[in-house]
Amino acid sequence: MTNEKPVEFSKEEWLLHLENLHIQRGDMNRLIMDYLVTEGFKEAAQKFKLESGIQPSVELDTLDERIKIRDAIQHGRIQEAIAMVNKLHPELLDTDHLLHFHLQQQHLIELIRLKNVEEALEFAQSHLAERGELDSDILHELERTLALLAFEDPENSPFGELLHPSQRQKVASELNASILETENRDSSPNLSNVLKLLLWAQNELDNKKIKYPKMTDFANGAIDAPSK
Amino acid sequence: MHMEVESNQCYINQLFSQDQVLSFEALVQLKNSVIGSNKQKSNVIIMGIVPRLMQLLLDGHTSVELLTEAAVVLGSLAKGSTVHIACLIDSDVPPVMIKGLAHPNQQFVEACLRCLRSVLMSPIAPVTLIYQDETVIPHLIHLLPRSFTTQETIANILAHCCRTMEHQMTLCSNGAIQALAPLLQTNNYKVQMPALKCCTAMCYQNPHVSLLVAEASFDGRYVSDSIVSLLSRDKPLEMQIAAAKCLTYMCRAGSVSPKEPCVVYKALPCLVCMCKKDKDPTTRIEGAETLAYLTEGDAELQRTAAASDHLISMLAEYLKYSHYRNTADVKKLEENERIRKDMVYAAFLAYASISANDEDIRKKIIETEGLMDTLVTCLANGSMKVCLASVRCLHSLSRSVQQLRTSFQDHSVWKPLMKLLYNSPEDILTAASSTLCNLLLEFSPSKEPIMESGAVEMLCSLTRRDNPALRLNGIWALMNMAFQAEQKVKSSILVALGTDQLFRLLADPDVNVLMKTLGLLRNLLTTKSVGHIDFIMGVHGKQIMQAIILILEGDHSPEVKEQALCILANVADGDAAKEFIMSNEDVLKKITSYMVHSNVKLQIAATFCISNLIWNEKEGAYERQLRLKELGVQKLLQQLLGTSDPVLFDKVKKALQQFS
């Protein structure tokens, strides 16, 4: 390695370089289709298929089950989602114990949300205590969830995030990924892998203390000028 | 808890309904209750669900939906604890699941397969079940390709139930290899792994099956190539190690040469990598054990392994491994102990294999800090498993002259080793007695104390064992003991062994035992001073001559006869002892006939014998020479001068020079 000064790019130069790179439109479309299929956006996938001509990797009807399941969770109907998963893949929840706990925990959260205290306690005792006994991390989670009951206004308590819709989303995604994995499909969309690769590359550059125009806002794809 | 039990009880009651629709609804609820909860599984079993489900499964009128749901629930119970599985086995569920495989409905068949697979993968699996009815295996193989579920479940079933050579042959003759080959190439980890494990189980110590696996191909690709590709570093660790293990078994069974690049440059380095400190203990243990097995008996592979990547120091880390640090938890400490034992076992096995043939490797290993201490401790206090591995390791190390003189002496290895010779199981006994043989070699400082602690009797008793390896070690150790030993030692050996036993050993079906017995005789009659020979012949001469004649007259290989002739040559080296030969016309005639034998080694031995008899510095030489001339010996010798063999020529010349 020669003792050269590392090349430094200004934001403009960087953007110019980027512009000269060509990504095939077909590749972009495939990434999008893959995302839609993996996440279960059936109608969007169907429309996109018509508009772009890209063939999805699976029959779109096979998405129906996953869509229904995600839907149930997103509306707080956890027991219903569990029953559907058990019908589709009876071994899944017997194998992925953490997922099963998260689903049970979500049901508990729903009961707490409805202020159904007695049923919530009974449910925690009969269904969740057994897991908590075996694993201290799970016990900790359980305690956090039950702590919600101690607050008048649980949504504004230190554990309030559990009542947030994003919690339902989290569980729905976890279940979706597990179903895909059981079916031997990629459980995360290629698009997220691409983003992870970008994150990793930027991290490597940061570790080597190299200055470069960094993408800090992924949602908008905004690139900042290199820091001084 | 109360509510759940109550509602489950309700559903169980409903399950007994004659109305199949009601039963089905109840069963679905019960299913959702038990999936994911071991507690509920226990509850419903107590409430009697299993017999009821069995009833439904065996009833010809049950609807296919209900049948399937029943199988699914049993499958969930089978995913519970070992206690749950035991319940299923006791209730005869597995045979009923097997019966279910004949049903036309794919969903039902798959539910049965999943249940069966979970039961047969448990530690209490009734592995012989699938072999009891000879239509089962062909049917399983027939079902195998149908779906991802059938592939995964059946491959797992076959992999876990393949335990004996008979099983291997049965699977093989039913086309298992051809059925598994495509599975190795699917891009599906859950299918590839059990397929790989099944191939591995089938190849274990089975040259016939291994060869078939090596030669099998699918879609233009050899199975062995598929296996090699599963070794690559981008595959999960478990898959790499499973593939390496498969190649190892194939190599040891002879269907893949140890010189093949896939072994030397792929499997071996993979296994070495598995021993690295950053891997979890299970991986490291399996890596070291498999490496030990792979390199056992092949000096090249041993050298390659030892030279890899600091293997020796990596294995040394195993000896100090502590999984949970800084803990006072009793359970964790017990776990620590258990894991450490397995790590030590694996490390010693690996050391034993790689140090079997190379002095430099042995040196490096012995220099490992704390190794000898650990070895000696394990000899005395280890579990059977660890003890065996320690002895094997010691055995390999004891092949080093230098080590015998230094480390082995410093640590008084012989003491715990001797203790092991009493009351040990055969495998430990075999390894310990082999090691002892080495410790009894002439230059070993341990020789004296061993002999003084009653080794002779113990070794003689070994020569009486059924196991030929033990007899061999016993007699070999005695042979080493007798080499250049004191008069009293030689006598004590002969007395302890007894001439009866000696004769028995000379008629031993194992030719190695025979050779070493002759070797013992030879050593007993080798001289520090001629007085030994005369003394021993004086007491046991008659029997010894009988033994030698027995060998010379018997149907034995030239090697054996050569030994016998060498013993005669030693007898001929004595003073008074010479008479034993000279007075025996039969023996003399035999010696002369061997002088003109087609095998030059026998000629040399016979000539050497003659040479000793006629040695003209000895008293009575003239008379003996006369006698032998009468028998035409001098003439024979002169004939032999024409030989092309330089050693023989030399001996003949020397002999002729003796004739005055």
Image: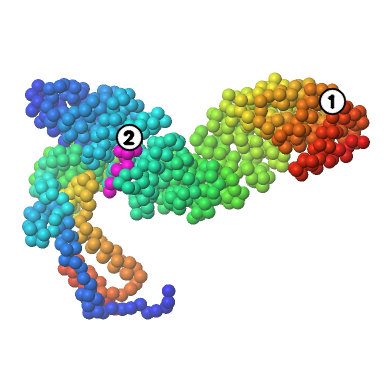
Residue A120, image quadrant = top left
- Which residue lies at the image location 92% right of the left edge and 36% below the top edge? B660
**In the image, what residue occupies the spot 54% across and 29% down?**
B425
Magenta includes B177?
Answer: yes
Q: Badge 2: how crowded within 10 Å, few (<14), some, or many (20+)?
A: some
Q: Looking at numbered disc 1 in the image, what kind of residue is underneath it?
A: Met
Considering only vertical position in the picture, is B46 above or below B243? Answer: above
In the rendered view, would you say A2 is above or below B609? Answer: below
Question: Residue A90: x, y in percent?
Answer: 19, 38
Label 2 close to label 1 by CB (< 8 Å):
no
Q: What secondary structure is found at the residue carrying circle 1? A: helix
- Number of numbered discs overlaid on the protein picture: 2
What amino acid is found at the position of numbered circle 2 in the picture?
A: Gly
Q: Nearer the viewer, residue B470 or B412?
A: B470
Helix or strand or loop: what does disc 2 sit on? loop
Task: Residue B145: give x, y in percent of width and height.
Answer: 25, 39
Residue closer to the observer: B586 or A22: B586
Q: Which residue is mark 2?
A: B175
**Residue matched to label 1:** B582
Q: Nearer the viewer, residue B60 or B610?
A: B610
**Which stretch is magenta?**
B175-187
Q: Label 2 lies in what chain?
A: B
Instruction: Quarter of the image for the C terminus of chain A: give it.
Output: bottom left
Q: Give percent across and percent down for residue B549.
A: 74, 24
Q: Is residue B484 magenta?
A: no
| Residue B582 rendering spot, x and y as whole percentages | 84, 25
Task: Decide which of tag 2 and tag 1 comes sooner along the chain.
Answer: 2
